[in-house]
Image (tube, grey):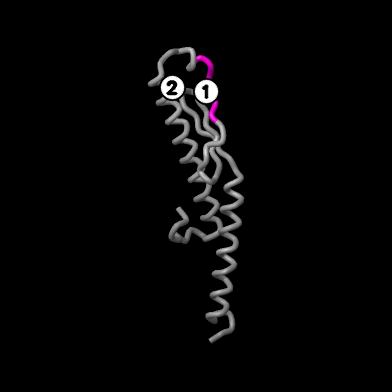
């Protein structure tokens, strides 16, 4: 058996991949994406840890007096932001794993 296929080498490669994945998750946590609804009247900024960092609601919605519409737009913008953050994370993980599906990695 060649030296490149030993169990120790495999474990070392797995450890390196784990470290790279952890770093990628940390990096993605610092990145932000924006979700919007109502033609940009509501915008939600979400980071890679799926935390909503900012929420912008256009003044016209606040003055419109339709709380249900405002609620729907906020929910839509936040959900779009979360989906965008999840997609960004999946793409980053895919680059590291070469498309290999790992448990707990999206």
Question: What secondary structure is marked by label 1?
Answer: strand
Mark 1 and mark 2 in contact (Cβ < 8 Å)?
yes
Q: Answer with the quarter of the image where residue 11 lies.
A: bottom right
Residue range (magenta): 55-60
Label 1 belongs to which residue? 57
Q: Position of residue 88 (x, y in %)?
A: 53, 46
Work out which residue is located at the far left of the displayed protein and give it.
Answer: 68
Q: In this view, does 61 lie to the left or right of 28?
A: left
Q: Is residue 87 above or below residue 17?
A: above
Q: In this view, does 55 lie above or below 84?
A: above
Q: How crowded is mark 1: few (under 14 residues within 10 Å), some or many (20 or more)?
A: some
Q: How far apart are marks 2 and 1 (CA)?
A: 8 Å
Q: Position of residue 104 (x, y in %)?
A: 45, 57
Q: In this view, does 72 lie to the left or right of 36?
A: left
Residue at x-position 58% and y-position 73%:
12
Residue at x-position 56% and y-position 59%:
21
Label 2 belongs to which residue? 70
Q: Where is residue 57 in the image (x, y as percent from the top left)?
A: 52, 23
Q: Which mark is residue 38?
A: none
Q: Which of 6 and 59 is in front in this view?
A: 59
Work out which residue is located at the far bottom of the displayed protein and give it.
Answer: 1
Residue at x-position 52% and y-position 60%:
98
């Amino acid at each position: 058996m060649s030296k490149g296929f030993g169990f120790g080498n495999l474990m070392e490669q797995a450890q390196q991949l784990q470290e790279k994945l952890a770093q990628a998750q940390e990096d993605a946590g610092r990145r932000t994406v924006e979700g919007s609804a109502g033609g940009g009247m509501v915008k939600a900024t979400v980071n890679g840890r799926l935390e909503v960092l900012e929420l912008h609601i256009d003044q016209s919605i606040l003055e419109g007096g339709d709380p249900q519409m405002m609620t729907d737009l906020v929910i839509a913008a936040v959900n779009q932001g979360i989906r965008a953050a999840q997609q960004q994370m999946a793409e980053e993980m895919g680059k590291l794993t070469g498309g290999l599906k790992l448990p707990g990695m999206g």
